Image (cartoon, coloured by chain):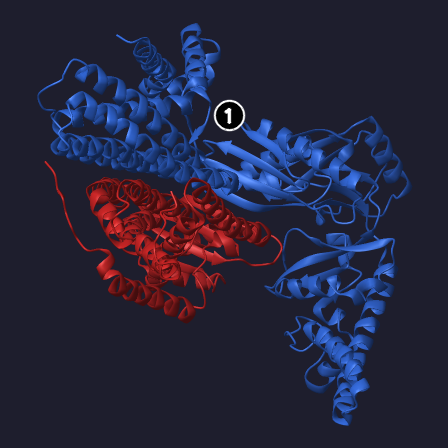
């Protein structure tokens, strides 16, 4: 036997053995029943040495088994965009890192096995939570800012002056808008070209004010009379006509101002309007988080006028835990304690402002605004929001993990439930099995004995491909299974090219050995050229693809390489071994 | 066993009708694309939310739609998906907090359809920013694939072969795109991946034929160019049909058994393989004939370039 032959036989044997070895953990992982897995994950596994051993074995085996993508095992993939508006590059970098730390902290407390939290580029964070059960909860835990602030409520006099300022400003804007629209009409009628630019800006201004919802009038709950009078009241009070103001309410709600539930969006839009800049810079409005049922049967939300600067923030929080809400059976509340610095501040603020109201605000929504009766030295407080047990414990978790330094929003999300993941695996595997079976049958019928060699090559190809996935920790996704299936179909190509070549050479009356020799050497060039182009497409997919698509590109690209190895090296060794002493006779091809 | 032994089909002879047939397919596709206002892009590229919900027992599509409309989701599209599921698509909303639309929709459905158990199987949300980026990336990747492939073929063969191969690829992708438009299927990230695979695969076929042409040009200098090409196509016919056959076997398995999640992907692959095989026989090689014969007329005698 030639030396090169020995080397090639050795190479094929080593590759196959290594592949089998690399796949052993995958088979072991697949053989562990889901009951055993549940047992090993349960809390009792911490104390039972047998279960602990099982758990360690599962961890060890899973770490080296083929990793399933989130679309196959269920889970959540998220890309978060961190709001970096108005930050210097350095601040932006800090904010990104800080957000990542806090989200990591939150997820650790939430308890997900093997989460991945990474920054991507300069403003994004990628979060992967495999095996996640409750996506809605995770979304709220990750995306919420959770900024806790304590803000003093302004006295009634401030309310009155600010409300008057707002009414005047919006009224003037409305009249200016009307005037601008009129003059725009005149200018356009004049037709002078220079007037056109002025008309454009004027019309633009008119359109802007038209966007503010002055036009439609809601039925007013308690205020104002009917008819003419009502119209003029609304015209003169574009802001307060949507609200209900009574200084007596202060004692009940901590604010004298209520907004009927259906007018809340209008008020929020008005407060975002540029005209709302007349609110003094040291004050701000915040909506209450909960609606209040009024005696008249209407529901309303309190609107608070607060200090712009918080007296104390959640940064100074040292503990947060939940307890049942005594006032509302079935509800839960969150009790928190401030750290030493926070408690000192809190005690100072409460001591200096006895008789005033202090709003507890979460993400710019006021939870409640109790009156300060005495100096509060210990820095303890409660948030009551009619929470369920889970909502309350999530809020406590958020408060403990800290607030995000800036807003984040979910720019992309892919979540797959566990049962869909199982369905997908089942569907993918059965498609792969039936596809492979069809191909194998076809090849054997078409090429007979030589077909068996091609089939051996095909199966080895899948084996090596899976081994590469397992060994290099690559992720298998549903499109990835599609890639394997496609590789099976295409891997046949190399064998077909070779066998057709050998047939042609045999027809030229060459000996079997010479035909095999010529067949392989002629087909090799074709196979390489043809596969390189598909590989180009695969590599580009790798570069551009995200998530599941990347999985497809991975299996397709590896599959092309492994199929070239099995077709050009493996089958050739077998064919040459089988035909090396044959100078006469036929070949079953 | 052998399907095609010593076939002598005059493929180059049917070049003209094949071109007309292809032009017709492309034309229908382009008309459909124009009528639909461009390809029907999925939320991967436009931004929005897709939700797959499992209902037991399953209500009618109308009931689901009414429930969503009652909660203010007027732009949501509802379609039955698989046997037990519904797919709800909500185009992008720019409002703040729209990334939580999935939660709001499932809550609304649970309220209105309290008689059925609703399980959220899948949520995909893409913001407009990433949607735009993905669109650019998809276009870039297809262009990059085409350019790299022309380069590779130019290096390994000659430029002329590269152009013929690329024209065949453009032909394949355009027709597949047209079919997607005709059937009103969405172009998603997965479908783009399928397109790139079609490009790679169809090329694979074309190159096998080109490789044979190159070889026969060297061996049979006395034959006319037309004959060499016909001979090459016939000699590789068995392989072309066999390989396409096995590939279609497996992609069809994926289509029928792979589940609804990769249905469109498998469809694009299956259709692409068929059209790619057709184009490498009837389009790519005849373009070479057409191109070379124009050069022959200039130079009287064709000099095989390799």
Residue A495 on image: x %, y %: 25, 31
In percent of the image, x 59 and y 35: which residue is there? A394
The answer to whether residue A89 is visible is yes
* Residue at mark 1: chain: A
Residue A408 x/y as whole percent: 65, 44
Residue B245 lies, in percent from the top left, at 21, 43
Label 1: few (<14), some (14–19) or many (≥20) C-alpha neighbours in 10 Å = few
Q: In this view, does B211 lie above or below B50?
A: above
* Residue B9, horizontal then vertical, whole percent: 17, 53
Question: Where is residue B69, by image quadrant?
Answer: bottom left
Q: Which chain is red?
A: B
In the image, taking residue B53 as reference, residue A282 lies left or right, namely right
Q: Does A515 sit above or below residue A287?
A: above
Work out whether residue A134 can be spotted: no
Residue at image location 44% in from the left, 30% down from the top: A475
Query: Could you tell me which secondary element the residue under label 1 belongs to?
Result: loop
Q: In this view, does A541 lie to the left or right of A224?
A: left
Q: Is residue A494 left or right of residue A300?
A: left
Image quadrant for the C terminus of chain A? top left
Tell me how many marks there are: 1
When asked about the image quadrant of residue A247, the answer is: bottom right
Colour blue maps to chain: A
Q: Which residue lies furthest to the bottom in this view?
A: A190
The residue positioned 15% from the left and 23% from the top of the image is A511
Q: Residue sitting at 82 percent across and 51 percent down?
A: A153
Q: Which residue is nearer to you in this view: A298 or B41?
A: B41
Residue B265 is left or right of residue A127, and the answer is: left
Q: Closest to the observer: B93 or B156? A: B156
Residue bearing mark 1:
A113
Which quadrant is the N terminus of chain A positioned in?
A: top left
Give the vertical position of A584 relative to B298 (above or below). Answer: above
């Amino acid at each position: 036997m030639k030396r090169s032959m020995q080397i090639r036989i050795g190479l094929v044997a080593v590759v196959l053995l290594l592949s089998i070895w690399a796949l052993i953990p995958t088979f072991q992982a697949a053989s562990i029943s889901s009951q055993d897995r549940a047992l090993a994950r349960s809390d009792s596994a911490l104390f039972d040495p047998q279960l602990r051993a099982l758990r360690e074995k599962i961890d060890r085996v899973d770490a080296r088994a083929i990793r399933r993508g989130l679309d196959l095992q269920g889970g959540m993939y998220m890309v978060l965009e961190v709001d970096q508006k108005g930050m210097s590059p350095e601040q932006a970098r800090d904010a990104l890192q800080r957000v990542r730390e806090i989200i990591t902290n939150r997820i650790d407390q939430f308890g997900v096995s093997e989460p991945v939290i990474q920054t991507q580029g300069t403003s994004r964070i990628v979060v992967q939570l495999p095996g996640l059960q409750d996506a809605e909860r995770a979304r709220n835990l990750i995306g919420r800012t959770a900024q806790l602030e304590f803000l003093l409520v302004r006295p009634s006099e401030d309310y009155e002056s600010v409300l008057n300022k707002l009414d005047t400003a919006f009224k003037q804007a409305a009249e200016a808008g009307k005037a601008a629209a009129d003059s725009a009409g005149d200018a356009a009628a004049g037709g002078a070209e220079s007037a056109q630019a002025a008309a454009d800006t004027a019309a633009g201004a008119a359109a802007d004010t038209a966007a503010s919802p002055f036009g439609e009038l809601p039925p007013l709950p308690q205020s104002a009379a009917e008819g003419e009078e009502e119209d003029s009241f609304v015209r003169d009070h574009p802001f307060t006509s949507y609200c209900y103001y009574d200084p007596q309410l202060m004692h009940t709600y901590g604010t004298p101002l209520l907004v009927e539930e259906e007018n809340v969006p209008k008020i929020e839009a008005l407060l975002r309007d540029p005209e709302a800049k007349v609110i003094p810079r040291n004050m701000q409005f915040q909506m209450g988080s909960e609606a209040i049922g009024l005696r008249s049967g209407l529901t309303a939300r309190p609107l608070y006028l607060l200090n712009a600067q918080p007296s104390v923030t959640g940064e100074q929080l040292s503990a947060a835990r939940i307890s049942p809400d005594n006032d509302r059976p079935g509800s839960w509340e969150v009790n928190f304690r401030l750290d030493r610095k926070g408690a000192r501040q809190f005690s100072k603020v409460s001591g200096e402002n006895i008789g005033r109201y202090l709003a507890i605000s979460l993400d710019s929504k006021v939870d409640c605004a109790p009156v300060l009766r005495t100096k509060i030295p210990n820095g303890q407080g409660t948030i009551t929001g009619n929470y369920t047990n889970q909502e309350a414990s999530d809020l406590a978790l958020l408060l403990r993990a800290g607030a995000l330094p800036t807003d984040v929003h979910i720019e992309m999300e892919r979540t797959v439930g566990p049962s869909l993941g199982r369905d997908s695996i089942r569907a993918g595997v059965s498609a792969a099995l039936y596809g492979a079976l069809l191909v194998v049958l076809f090849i054997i019928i078409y090429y007979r004995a030589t077909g068996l060699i091609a089939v051996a090559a095909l199966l080895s190809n899948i084996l090596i491909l899976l081994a590469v996935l397992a060994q290099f920790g690559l992720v298998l996704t549903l499109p990835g299974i599609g890639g394997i299936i496609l590789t099976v179909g295409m891997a046949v190509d190399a064998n077909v090219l070779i066998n057709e070549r050998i047939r042609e050479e045999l027809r030229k009356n060459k000996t079997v050995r010479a035909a095999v020799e010529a067949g392989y050497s002629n087909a090799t060039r074709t196979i390489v050229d043809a596969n390189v182009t598909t590989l180009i497409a695969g590599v580009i997919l790798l570069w551009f693809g995200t998530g599941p698509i990347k999985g497809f590109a991975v299996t397709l690209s590896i599959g092309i390489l492994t199929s070239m190895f099995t077709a050009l090296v493996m089958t050739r060794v077998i064919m040459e071994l089988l035909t090396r002493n044959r100078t006469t006779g036929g070949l079953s091809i | 066993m052998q399907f095609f032994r010593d076939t002598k089909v005059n493929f180059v002879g049917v070049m003209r009708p094949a071109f007309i047939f292809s032009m017709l397919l492309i034309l229908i596709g382009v008309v459909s694309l124009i009528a639909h206002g461009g390809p029907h892009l999925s939320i991967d590229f436009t931004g929005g939310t897709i939700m797959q919900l499992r209902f037991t027992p399953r209500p009618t599509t109308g009931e689901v739609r009414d429930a969503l409309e009652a909660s203010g989701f007027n732009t949501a599209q509802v379609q039955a998906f698989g046997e037990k599921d519904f797919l709800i698509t909500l185009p992008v909303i720019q409002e703040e907090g729209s990334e939580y639309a999935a939660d709001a929709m499932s809550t609304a459905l649970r309220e209105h359809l309290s008689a059925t158990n609703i399980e959220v199987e899948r949520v995909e949300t893409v913001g407009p920013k990433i949607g735009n980026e993905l669109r650019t990336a998809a276009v870039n990747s297809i262009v990059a694939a085409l350019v790299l492939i022309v380069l590779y073929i130019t290096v390994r063969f000659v430029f002329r072969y590269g152009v013929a191969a690329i024209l065949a690829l453009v032909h394949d992708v355009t027709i597949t795109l047209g079919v997607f438009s005709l059937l009103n299927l969405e172009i998603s990230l997965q479908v783009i991946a399928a397109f790139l695979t079609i490009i790679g695969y169809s090329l694979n076929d074309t190159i096998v034929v080109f490789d044979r042409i190159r070889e026969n040009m060297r061996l049979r200098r006395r034959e006319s160019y037309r004959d060499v090409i016909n001979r090459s196509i016939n000699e590789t016919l068995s392989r072309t049909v066999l390989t396409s056959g096995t590939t279609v076997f497996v992609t069809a398995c994926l289509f029928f058994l792979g589940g609804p999640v990769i249905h469109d992907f498998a469809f694009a692959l299956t259709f692409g393989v068929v059209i790619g095989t057709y184009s490498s026989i009837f389009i790519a090689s005849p373009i070479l004939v057409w191109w070379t014969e124009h050069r022959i007329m200039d130079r009287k005698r064709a000099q095989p370039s390799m």
